Image (cartoon, rainbow, N blue to C red):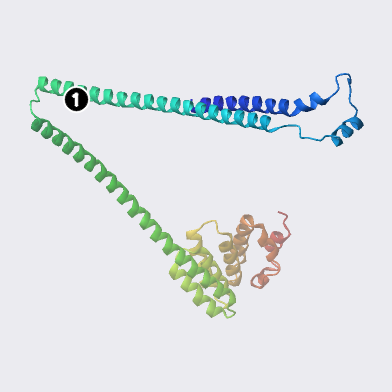
Amino acid sequence: MPSLLKSNLTRLLTQKSAQCFTALIFLFCLPAMAQTPPSSDKITAQSAQETAKTLSEPLYNPFIERYILDEMKQLRIDQAQTKNELIQQIVDREHRSVDRAVAYATDTVSYFFYLIAAATSILVLIGWTSIREIKERVHSLADEEISRLVQQYEKRLETIESEIQKKTAHIQANRKEIELTQEVQSLWLRAQQESAPSSKIIIYDKILQLRSDDCEALTYKADTVLELDEPQWAANLCHQALEIDPQNSHAFYQLGCSYAALNNPDEAVQFLHKAIAKNESYRNELQTDPALQSLKNFEPFQRLISATP
């Protein structure tokens, strides 16, 4: 609503200013029109310049100036009065809005107290005749609700605590496993760097102390033992690895090499055949492995080498 009044005021002031400007233009042009000959219908640009040069007095006089000033003063007075009227209307409407808000708040508070009185009357009718009884009843209900919530949250906390303990144990186990894996990895790196078979066996024993079911450590230890010319020991290690992982192709290959060193070519070829059946890449190593040189002239071994996959 104030914006509408403001727009009306602006439009009114604009109209007044336009009227004043029109009057000024008329007053300034009146003397020039009086000096223009009535017989001339059109004035060229050259004649207008000559007329301007021959002017001997201004186009307006003090009387006209006084008239213009009085009109402007009256216009300002009218604008001030209009502005005051609009401001008064805005203030009146604001007062009416405040009065309505106060009346609404008063009615709301009155209705609220009426509602409280009605509720109190109903409570008295159903048997709660005193504020003390109401207070005690509220306290008892609050205690019961609090007790129920406490029990519920205690159960939840117990569940959360048990889950946290399980996760903590799992994290601890994972941490130990990670530490063990890192230690085993470092031992494997040391074993690759060692050149002496006896030093490698010591490292493999350390790996087996950390992980007794490490088939890879057993088979690599068997390979190292074969280098020390201990085929029976290597065969025992491979059998231990097969007890842990019956499908370990490296264990079968090392068993074949062990039995070849024990002068048992039939069993050697049998285990080599199992190794190739599980991993075809061992077929390329049969002709170059020094541990199998004793089987070169053995016919089943030749057939195994020449057999196509």
Query: Residue at the location (54% across, 28% down)?
Result: 79
Q: At which x and y percent is residue 87?
A: 46, 29
Q: At which x and y percent is residue 309?
A: 70, 54
Depth check: give the residue in front, 107 or 23.
Answer: 23
Query: Residue at the location (44% across, 27% down)?
Result: 88
Query: Residue at the location (47% across, 73% down)?
Result: 205
Crowd rating for badge 1 (residues with CA inside 10 Å; few <14, some 14–19, many 20+): few
Res. 236 in view: no
Depth check: give the residue in front, 109 or 251.
Answer: 109
Residue 227, quarter of the rendered image: bottom right
Query: To which residue does mark 1 refer?
Result: 116
Dot 1 falls on a residue whose secondary structure is helix
Residue 42, quarter of the rendered image: top right
Give amino acid for label 1: Ile
Depth check: give the residue in front, 282 or 299.
Answer: 282
In the rendered image, the vertical position of residue 31 relative to residue 161, given as above or below = above
Is residue 40 left or right of 125 when viewed as pictured?
A: right
Depth check: give the residue in front, 245 or 183.
Answer: 183
Is residue 23 left or right of 57 when viewed as pictured?
A: left
